[in-house]
Amino acid sequence: MQTITIQPDRSRTRRLTAFGAAVAVSVLLAGCVAASSSASPSGPAQASPFASAGESLSVSPVESPSSTASATPDHAASPAVDATTTLGPHSTQTAAPASKWTGLKWTAAGKAFLQTPVPPNQDSSLDVSIFGWSGGYVGFRSVVPMTDAGTPVVVSTTSADGLYWTAARSVDATGLVIFGGVAQVVEGPGGLLAVGRPQAMACGGPPRVDALWTSTDGVAWTRVPFAANFGSNTIYTVDAGSTGYIATGASGDGTTQFVWLSQDGRTWHVANLSKATFGEALVQGATNFASGYVIVGALPGDEGCGGVSSLTPSLWWSLDGAKWTQGKLTGAVPSTESWMTVKRINDHCLMAIATEWNESTQVSTEKVWVSADGQTWTLVTSPSPLLNSDVLSINNRGVAVLTPTDNKGPATIAGVGNDLAVGPLVQSGDTPIYSDTSSWWQFALGPNGLVAYSDDGTDLRVGTATV
């Protein structure tokens, strides 16, 4: 087993400052068909050169939720669901039928999402998060002490349709200091993997992972032993697809990078990143999908008197995590700074984005590539402007959610097809609306449609997909 030893990532914080939102948040696009596909990223809040996309789309149909009536006004009065109930067979490779979503019919569910625990005093904060998966939705409510003197209280709940949720079930948060909440849930061959992160700090470097939990059904969650799997190293990114789980990170001093792989989310091992293939690569992200694993990053140029002279966007693919091959990125050129991200649009489509900074011209640029197999990558020249915010995906379906530019009115929600075309979904009913007085909406994609919820979890809307 061999790890890559490189120079400390001296420019990670500087890159975040120079690139702004283009580096701090993922650039998004959607859909994938064969190697000749094109795709659509999002970018920072600036004029977009992206061309408009067509209106056709091809995503999975859904069954209607068990009820479209408004949910009861509080969680305690909601129909009881036994916390041990399995919400359906676990699957991450559902075939995408030919029919498409055409709209979303929204139902106001009020306080259907659980309302306990609550912050006991001003020395604690509340984090609420909901995520979609192939079996429905999972949610977490965390009361977090603002100091390292107390232990967070974290509970989970789950729903098959977004309207009816299980009773609160405790999640092990022992020993977590300055915990920020559950920030991500990914789905792989062994089930769900929830990712906990600490509270964001003003000057703390890139966000790290401080807890992982696994679940096969979204009901019961088991803590992953951190020290046994990762030692004293730091994890930065976690992702999963139908063939495995992957995490990236580094040693405490930042000089040695690591990539960890897992088949069940519980037991992890270090990937063999040989010098012959990776050289002195700077690993910046990774993902998994039906065709294997992809790692993205940058290769440094010759060392000058001031250190690394340039960085070139690069990526590597592996079917099983054992043998890696460097991919060819047409149009990738050395820049003063380069930051790569990778996004799994669905289980058969990936997008890679390079954000580059040229010191001499003071210009930041983005390049986007798309791949159906992780090996052949096509440079995209005109991605859709509808994908400037977020793309939600489960299995073989994707939906783009774009927040209104002035934070007033409804979000634009578009289906994303495997032919790379995107088209807005017609919204009706109790549509989530942004305003100066409303809470910020967050969205989760499930098998029946979407769930939208306010940051405090007190206002939940269920959008049933129409076909």
Image: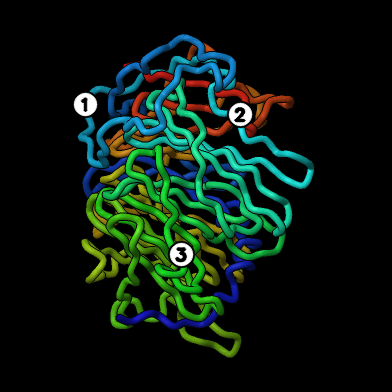
Q: Looking at the rendering, which quadrant does residue 405 occupy?
A: top right
- Give SS at disc 2: loop
Name the residue type under label 3: Phe
Residue 226, numbered label: 3
Label 1, label 3: how far apart the Cα atoms are: 42 Å
For this view, does 313 lie left or right of residue 433? left
* Disc 1 element: loop
- Outermost residue, bottom side: 305
Nearer to the camera, 451 or 17: 451
Residue found at x 64% / y 68%: 14
Element type at mark 3: helix
Amino acid residing under circle 2: Gln
The residue at the point 52 percent across, 27 percent down is: 452
- In this rendering, the answer to whether 106 lies above or below 384 is above
Is any atom of residue 214 visible in this view?
A: yes
Decide if residue 457 is on the left or right side of residue 278.
right
Labelled disc at residue 98: 1
Which disc, if any, is residue 327? none
Near mark 1 (Cα within 10 A), the count class, few <14, some 14-19 or many ≥20, is few
Q: Residue at x 33, y 33 (%)?
A: 135
- Residue 52 in sight: no
Q: Which mark is residue 115?
A: 2
Please tell me how many numbered marks the rendered image carries. 3
Give percent across and percent down for residue 246. 36, 60
Pointer 1 or 3: first along the chain: 1
Look at discs 2 and 1 and give the one toward the viewer: 2
The quadrant in which the C terminus is found is top left
Q: Earlier in the sequence, mark 2 or mark 3?
A: 2
Residue 353 percent across, percent down from the top left: 43, 55
User: Residue 325, relative to residue 175: is it above or below?
Assistant: below
